Amino acid sequence: MKNKLVIVLSVILTLTLLLTSVAFAAGGKKDITVAQEAGQAWLDSTVEPPEWIGARLTTPQAYYDLEGKPSAYMFTIENNGQVVGHIIVGSSAYGYPVFEAADCPPPSIPSADEGKSILERDLGLKIAKIGNPTRLLYLGFDNLFAVYQAGQQEVAVNLAFDFAISAASLTAAIPSPEVYKANKKVTGEAISELLEGSDYSSLSLPGSGYYWLPMVHYSELERRACGPDSGVSIGWYYKTRTSGYGPQYPDLPSTREAMYDRLYACMGTDSNGNTWSWNYGPGFVAMTQESGYDNFYYYGDYWPSHGDYENIVSWINRGWPTALLAARFNYELKGDYLGNFPPPGGHCIAIKGYKFPYNANVQYSIICTDSYSHSDSLYLDWDHMTIGLPPYTCTIWDS
């Protein structure tokens, strides 16, 4: 394990040295410093996971938007010389919010051989040599790209899922800074209305609810389909929860493996690991009905709004885990914008909590488990990944 961590640190350091001059030229050293300070302050206010207590941000790396302006900065999270996660902080245009943070290493840049293989597989390009990335792009959740010059054209490789796409086909999966700030204001107003209710007075406590649910992270290599994977997290929570969260459900499948297999079948997951959005909630309900329970329901919201964050806060405080199905890649956002049905694909993650506020810079985050990134604690900023874009949610709860 120690050797693996050393290798990870070496790769991160090498990449940083290769691209640092570009980062400072575009974003400026002061901008990176302020972003690092903002990210460190956020990290210091976070108590989950415990490996982050006393951790520091290192190896800054700039990411850009499609116009070549800095959109975010990524930092490695280190504690006692070990990599314990990474964090993505928005640029000055966004006011330095924490867009994402996860307890897994930052995504790596493909090697020259890996890059050539990906380009040939996905785009049919056969090139003799591929150099270092010309720039790195952050276009929203799961939309991290390394851009390369391949002959006469620019191509981009997704760093989270290792697929290639023409750089000309990329679109932003993140609101503009102006829209983001407006979204954040409206979400705050929705939460303020919730806090005014007597039943939710406890929610005014900083960080309330962001470590309440002991969700299960399950991602063996042969069981890495995100639909049944996140379903296992929710199902196993109900299977093992204590009386403090309500009755147990002993007749659910007895092991995580058995539960995964039933969800795989009930959700209609295919051999490529795809679970269609309209099968996710009904599939979970079908599994529970097999076990003799009919008090699970699903709620589908194809166009998340500011009020949905309010709903998530309410559900988590009642002990109801939530599943989020977000558009995985930016080209999937070209679905039916009239709202007749969701985009053609997505990535299921299980929400186990929320976090707000964060000092003077109030942020509204959801906390998830993510099978693809192997992250047990994945913090996502609500307003930068949903409002004004068409990802969609499915919620499962016990009546």
Image (cartoon, rainbow, N blue to C red):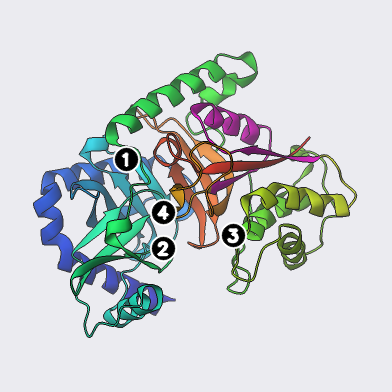
- On residue 331, the disc is 4
Vertical comparison of 246 with 124: above or below: above
Closer mark to the observer between disc 1 and disc 3: 3
Provide the residue designation for mark 2.
Answer: 160
Cβ atoms at labels 1 and 3 below 8 Å apart: no
The answer to whether 180 appears left or right of 394 in the picture is: left
Task: Name the element at disc 2.
Answer: loop
- Quadrant in the picture for residue 321: top right
Tell me the CA gap for discs 1 and 3: 32 Å
Relative placement, left or right, of 103 versus 108 is right
Real-space CA distance between mark 1 and mark 4, rounded to the nearest whole angstrom: 34 Å
Pointer 1 residue: 41
Tag 4 secondary structure: helix
Quadrant in the picture for residue 152? bottom left
x%, y% of residue 42?
36, 41
Which of marks 4 and 1 precedes in the sequence? 1
